[in-house]
Image (spheres, rainbow, N blue to C red):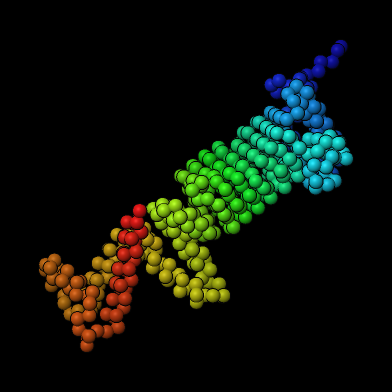
Amino acid sequence: MKKIIKKCTHQDCNLKTYNHQNKCILHCYKNGWTTEPKAVYENIDYNIFWNELRKFIDYFHTNNGNDILIFEGIVFPEFTKYNKPLTSNIDEPLTNDYYFWKKGETRSFKKMAHFKNCIFYNFDFNLMKCESLILDNIEVKGTLSISNCDIEYLSINIKVIETLKIETLKNLELNIYNSNINCSIFNNISLKSIKFLNSTFNKIKLTNLVIEKGIFENINFNYIEKYSNIKIEDINKFQYLSVYTKKTNDREYFRFFKNYFFDKRDYIEANKMYKREMDTYLKITFNELMKPQNIFENFQNLIILGFGKISSNFGQSWFHSLILIIIVLFFNIYYTSKLKLSYLFSGYANLWDKMAQLFYIKDIENFGMIDLLFKVLIALLVYQLTITLKRKTRF
């Protein structure tokens, strides 16, 4: 009886099924594959996969030209750096087959490599060249790393991922949209353009970035773990719209965008960033209060920050300051005068007349320490009220 060879069930794939699955070596799941580093050399599954993928690339180039590659629905096994190329020179011909490329080729995708609906298991794009790398509706089981590459345009739309690392790239146009990324790291990148659109970053690190232009729009930063050494070369070419930041232990992020909005004369948003910066600073100071070093300095800072928070919510609420001024004036009258409450509330004129008298020193001989403390407190609250009104009326 003639043996029936089953074909891969993936659309437009004519390869035979592999290892008792209903899909071929390219499209089948790799959950059971070993992750040991030496498996790249010794595991037959890996060898078969990469040999078949290189055949697919040859076939694609034959039918579509050498400048574009489209990988659709392919499930890539775990990448390991154990099998490094013999040289860090991307343009030097390979002496052995290496992942996507055959012996004698360079590590280049030419104009464009488009990965559509693909699945990656801990994959690393490292030391390769490509004008445009497009990762469209991909799923990553583990970490996807893109580093030390010569890439001009990088577009990412990630369906599922644990960690995304993009590091050590130059003159890059970066576009991330419609993605939900659990942990992301962006480090040591010069960006001709950056676009974060309609995405959620649960935990993010942004360090050592130089940005020519860009836009953050409809973004959720649930936790900014680190934000440092960021430079925007032209603030008029950068837009920051509908960005929500839930938590960060690094006030540098809010300080940076406070200055950004001040430079753009958007004082309303600048004041919001100032408030978030001070809230973060208050939290940091409180957490460091009981540390042996600088305990006295931290205690002083905590008093000042606490007063700013209570009196005006760091310049956001003039009403807080006004109500506190009235309350302090009332208690000043109650504790420093011999008048009874029945007299003060016998008519509004009596109460307000006494409050008005407290703004100046009428009887220097009977002026005591309690009077001084109340007047200092009133002066501080009036200052907070003035600053808050100035912030709210500066447009």
Q: Which of 267 and 314 is in front in this view?
A: 267
Q: Which of 132 and 5 is in front in this view?
A: 132
Q: Residue at x 52, y 50 (%)?
A: 234
In the image, residue 377 sits, relative to residue 55, either above or below, namely below
Q: Which residue is drawn at 61% across and 42% down?
A: 174
The x and y percentages for residue 63 are: 75, 22
Using residue 96 as the reference point, say whether residue 376 is left or right of it: left
Specify the farthest residue to the bottom: 365
In the image, residue 274 sits, relative to residue 25, either above or below, namely below
Quarter residue 72 falls in: top right
The x and y percentages for residue 7 are: 76, 19
Q: Which residue is drawn at 22% across and 77% down?
A: 360
Quarter residue 374 falls in: bottom left
The x and y percentages for residue 156 are: 62, 38
In the image, residue 174 sits, relative to residue 380, either above or below, namely above
Q: Which residue is drawn at 51% across and 60% down?
A: 251
Q: Which of 341 and 388 is in front in this view?
A: 388
Query: Could you tell me if residue 220 is visible in this image?
Result: no
User: How many callouts does the rendering have?
Assistant: 0
Q: Nearer the viewer, residue 297 or 25?
A: 297
The x and y percentages for residue 191 are: 61, 47
